[in-house]
Image (cartoon, rainbow, N blue to C red):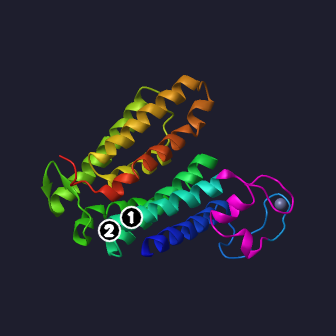
Amino acid sequence: MAATLAFVLGSAVGSFLNVVVDRIPAGGSLFRPRSRCGACGTPLKTIDLVPIVSYLLIRGRCRYCRTSIPSRLLAVEAITAALFLAAFLRFGPSPAFLAAALCGAVLIVIAASALETGRPLTHALVIGAVAAASLAPFWTEIGIPRGFSGHDGLAWSAASSVAGGAAVLITMAAAYATRLLPPRAEGVAVAAIGGLFAGFPGALVAAGAIALAAGFVYASGVRGKAYFADRRAVLVAATSSLAALPFLLIGTSAWP
Ligand SMILES: [Zn+2]
């Protein structure tokens, strides 16, 4: 029962994250006006706004004008719901659950915005997330197992974050140096957030995702002036920080 509640809470938070992605870049209020269809402008009723369920019931199309609704809405709701459920099953009702669920939600909203627009939501949010990520070493105090090379405790947890952040940054730097990716400061920040949260060796998964995605970007060919303006560095960072998401829950002590 409590696990179901965690899932429902996660889907509601995911629904809110979608509003954040839609409205913050346009400078709109998060709470007014009421959500409307992006195509026909019809104000949505409560029945249209039930997370996950509404999207499935109307099969991804507006009930009024039949225009298809971006699948990002469903993806963000479903991923956030799954994250909250997994965090609850892992930690139960505890501060650890809140820390993992909220930090995961931040990664999801930054990644969703970056994947859609090529930019993380706002610089303020990214700076806030870096600040929150730098608190990850203290998670040992609320029961999230974080360690490093078989050692536990605060200092080792910090070492895990530093090593995780470094693994990600070195991979990004290598991708920039070899011109696999165009250098973008937001890309570095977003990737580092995932690394600091996930710690070591979880961040290696994120680093691997960066290398892989950078290879695809390179293979797809970016040339000339457009290279430095290219947004793909941010997209790659966003995907890889999502790859680090499960390691928020596993902690880092579970590793040898
Ligand atoms: Zn419509």
What's drawn in magenta, residue-wise? 44-71
Q: Is residue 107 visible?
A: yes
Can you give x and y, in whole percent of width and height, for residue 252 in the image? 25, 53
Magenta span: predominant SS is: loop
The quadrant of the image that shows the N terminus is bottom left
Q: Residue furthest front?
A: 1
What amino acid type is highlighted by mark number 1?
Ala
Quadrant housing residue 20? bottom right
Query: As drawn, is 84 to the left or to the right of 151?
Result: right
Looking at the rendering, the quadrant in which ligand 1 lies is bottom right
Residue beneath the point at 78% across and 70% down: 44
> Residue 231 in the image: x percent, y percent?
58, 40
Q: Which residue is mark 1?
A: 87
Q: Residue 190's spot in the image, x, y percent?
A: 45, 50
Q: Residues within 10 Å of mark 2 (few under 14, many from 20)?
A: some
In this rendered view, identify the residue nearer to me: 12 or 32: 12
Please tell me whether mark 1 sits on a helix, a strand or a loop. Answer: helix
Q: Position of residue 91 (x, y in %)?
A: 32, 68
Category of crowding for the residue at label 1, using alpha-carbon neighbours closer than 10 angstroms: few (below 14), some (14–19), many (at least 20): many
Reading the image, the residue beneath label 2 is 91
Decide if ligand 1 comes within 8 Å of the CB at mark 2: no
Q: Is residue 122 visible to us here?
A: no
**Eyeballing the image, is 2 above or below 202?**
below
65 part of magenta stretch = yes
The answer to whether the residue labelled 1 contacts the one labelled 2, judged by CB atoms less than 8 Å apart, is: yes
What's the distance in space between the residues labelled 1 and 2, CA to CA? 6 Å
- Residue 228 appears left or right of 256: right
Is residue 28 covered in magenta? no
Q: Check disc 2 and give the amino acid type.
A: Phe
Residue at 26%, 72% in the rendered image: 142
- Residue shown at 32%/48% (left/top)? 165
